[in-house]
Amino acid sequence: MEYARVVGLVAVGLLAVLALSAVAYLGPPVSVTPARAVVALLLLFVALLALTARVGLETE
């Protein structure tokens, strides 16, 4: 179970890095304010928790 959780965390982390690098390379599609950045990071964190919880339930 822990192995699946670590793999999920690494996968989502890599996707986040790819998304941030794409935004840095192409420029932001909309004006990114600090508040929007915080909301986006919170949504990413919640999605990560949901993904790891689901993977954990499927492996039990």
Image: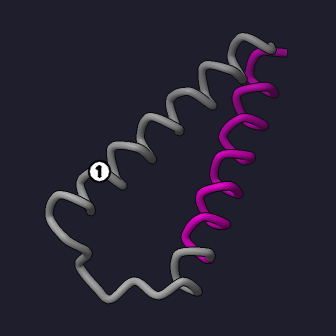
Dot 1: what SS?
Answer: helix
Label tally? 1
In the image, is residue 54 part of the stretch drawn in magenta? yes
Report the amino acid beneath label 1: Ser
Please state the horizontal and vertical placement of residue 16, each as a whole percent of the image: 45, 47
Residue 51 picture location, percent across and down = 66, 40
Q: Which residue lies under the disc numbered 1? A: 21
**Dot 1 alpha-carbon crowd within 10 angstroms: few under 14, some 14 to 19, many 20 or more:** few
Task: Depth check: give the residue in front, 57 or 13.
Answer: 13
What's the residue at 68%, 20% (across, down)? Answer: 6
Q: Position of residue 29 (x, y in %)?
A: 23, 78
Q: Quadrant of the N terminus?
A: top right
Is 26 rendered above or below residue 45?
A: below
Q: Is residue 11 left or right of residue 60?
A: left
* Highlighted magenta segment, given as a residue range: 39-60
State whether residue 4 is above or below residue 8: above
Q: Is residue 6 left or right of residue 12?
A: right
